[in-house]
Image: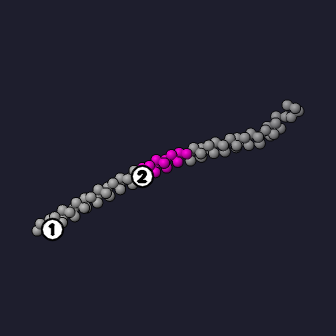
Amino acid sequence: MFGMTWPTVLLACAPWIFGLSGVFYLGLRAVRALERRTTGRTEMAGLEERTLRLEESVSSLSDQLQQLSDGQEFTAKLLGERK
């Protein structure tokens, strides 16, 4: 091959082979990192939605508890006036 022996050809190609395989490996790692990042955003959006629903539920329960408390005070007042 152009007057070069096989060991010389292999030594000449080795850095290119290692370099290209390294670039391929780093590219693959970058793609996986981006996939994990988008998955994390999707999970975060789901958690935010769930948190909002929990806040609404707690607010609703707080309103109901306030109504029960008002009813109890009214009942106690009526019973107090009755005696």
Q: Quadrant of residue 5?
A: top right
Asked if residue 70 lies in the magenta stretch, the reply is: no
**Residue in view at x 72 percent, y 40 percent:** 20
**Cα–Cα span, label 1 and label 2:** 42 Å
- Secondary element type, mark 2: helix
Examine the rendering and report whether any part of residue 1 can be seen: yes
- Badge 1 crowding class, 10 Å Cα cut-off, few under 14, some 14 to 19, many 20 or more, is few
How are the residues colored?
one colour
**Residue in view at x 52 percent, y 48 percent:** 41
Does 43 appear above or below 70? above
Spot occupied by residue 13 in the image (x, y as percentages of width and height)? 79, 38
Amino acid carrying label 2: it is: Leu
Spot occupied by residue 54 in the image (x, y as percentages of width and height)? 38, 52
* Relative horizontal placement of residue 68, taking residue 42 as reference (left or right): left
Q: Main secondary structure of the magenta part?
A: helix
Asked if residue 41 lies in the magenta stretch, the reply is: yes
Examine the rendering and report whether any part of residue 7 can be seen: no
Amino acid carrying label 1: it is: Gly
Between 41 and 76, which is closer to the camera in this rendering?
Answer: 76
* Relative horizontal placement of residue 47, taking residue 83 as reference (left or right): right
Disc on res. 80? 1
Between 64 and 7, which is closer to the camera in this rendering?
Answer: 64
Spot occupied by residue 17 in the image (x, y as percentages of width and height)? 74, 39
Spot occupied by residue 73 in the image (x, y as percentages of width and height)? 22, 64
- Badge 2 crowding class, 10 Å Cα cut-off, few under 14, some 14 to 19, many 20 or more, is few
- Secondary element type, mark 1: helix
Name the quarter where the N terminus is drawn.
Answer: top right
Disc on res. 52? 2
Between 11 and 42, which is closer to the camera in this rendering?
Answer: 42
Between 65 and 19, which is closer to the camera in this rendering?
Answer: 65
Q: Magenta stretch?
A: 38-50
